[in-house]
Amino acid sequence: MSDDGVLVIEGCAVAAVDAAGTEHRSGHVVVRGNLIEALGAGAAPEIVGATRIDGRGCLLTPGLVNTHHHLYQWVTRGLAADATLFEWLTTLYPVWAGIDEDALRVAATGALASLARTGCTTSTDHHYVFPREGGDLLGAEIDAAARVGLRFHPTRGSMDLGHSAGGLPPDSVVENLDDILRASADAVSRWHDRSFDSMLRIGLAPCSPFSVSADLLRESAFLARELGVRMHTHVAETLDEHQYCLDTHGCTPAEYLEKLGWVGPDVWWAHAIHLDDSAIDTMARTLTGVAHCPTSNGRLGAGIARVTDLLAAGVRVGLGVDGAASNESSSLIEEPRNALLFARLRGGPRALSVRTALELATIGGARVLGRENEIGSLEPGKLADLALWRLDGPAHAGIEDPVAALILGSAPPLAALVVNGRIVVRDGEIRTIDEDEVGRQVARAQASLVAKAR
Ligand SMILES: [Zn+2]
């Protein structure tokens, strides 16, 4: 399709995930260029020259938004498979210390392809490992996202608290404060695109309370606000971290982050599991967002986030797969399902509905990234980021409610994934890259990284 071409999808069930909860048993969408022009029930109008997709047997939803990831971990999966977070980190840091721009380009391509195949149209990344000889790491993953064709919100992450200074990471993978701030400002001026249909926005993201100094958190917040970009970090992921903050700072992780300016509408926290009521009040009052990552939290046995309480308090909640080293599948469509299951295990059968789970994966994520006016729901005038799920195969045929089939059934194949008006996936195949070749490159990069660490 050309830049201003027209794409029509029709005959499909539609879940718009708009404020009115609009759904159609059989409906259509018209995309012109990169915008949704029309959405409605029944067949689409005749439009000469339009590309038409027959959506019968499918459900059309907004593309999913992934609010937390570490793409580089796609080449370090399956290590420390039965470990706690701190054990897992200390096993993996020496492997991650070998990351360079070639390995990251391959890892990001593989991880983003997996996201695309599971309905993701917008992904963040939190990259915080910058070995001295690593090259242009952020540039490599930005190239990968452009190649795969996803909307991308990478963050310039950082660590400055090495082992010798009382932190968890080895000294070889931490940077000094001045270098981090300079590189962060450079990344924003080089890549951050503020336009309505931006495919690329940068955020700043010191890694976590146990791998960065208070100075780095404070200075990064100041710089992010001066530059007008968003802020992201890991908070309250495990009880070990909770205890570390009590021992080291005399307060909870949430209190520590608030003291350093890390709350506000421009901030989102990854995980936010071990929160007391006052932390939830703080997040609601300051409009701080959350990337909820249920699969990773389960993989590491970190705990179950208080999602129902967060939503009841009015906190913005999106979903994330988290890094592939703690979620080997990185399948975004499984996150709303796991969010629902975890919430119900914690709070009973009414703790999270199937439609709220779909909201978290779409408009919820868009709100967390400050892009709710552009993406996250199907509405005329919004950007054309769409997922068309095939629900007439043997795994889903006959499930009464298509939204329940999507959220509660097994992960369905995609009939199509459209990002910014462009078809990225068609009939389950990614059109933009050769996935088999990427798979071979991933295996080689993984073997070489593990060998380097031994
Ligand atoms: Zn993470």
Image (cartoon, rainbow, N blue to C red):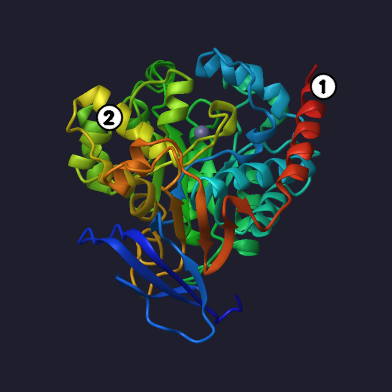
Residue 220, position in %: x, y? 51, 46
Q: Is residue 288 visible?
A: no
Residue 197, horizontal then vertical, whole percent: 49, 70
The residue lying toward the viewer, choosing from 454 and 441, is 441
Callout count: 2
Residue 249: horizontal and vertical position, in percent? Answer: 40, 23
Residue 451 falls in image quadrant: top right
> Which mark is drawn over residue 451?
1
Say which label, 1 or 2, has the lower sequence index: 2
Q: For the residue marked with disc 1, what is the amino acid?
A: Ala
Is 9 left or right of 154, judged from the image as shown?
left
| Label 2 sits on residue | 343
Q: Nearer the viewer, residue 160 or 80?
A: 80
Q: Secondary structure at mark 2?
A: helix
- Distance (Cα) linking label 1 and label 2: 40 Å
Disc 1 packing (10 Å; few <14; some 14–19; many ≥20): few
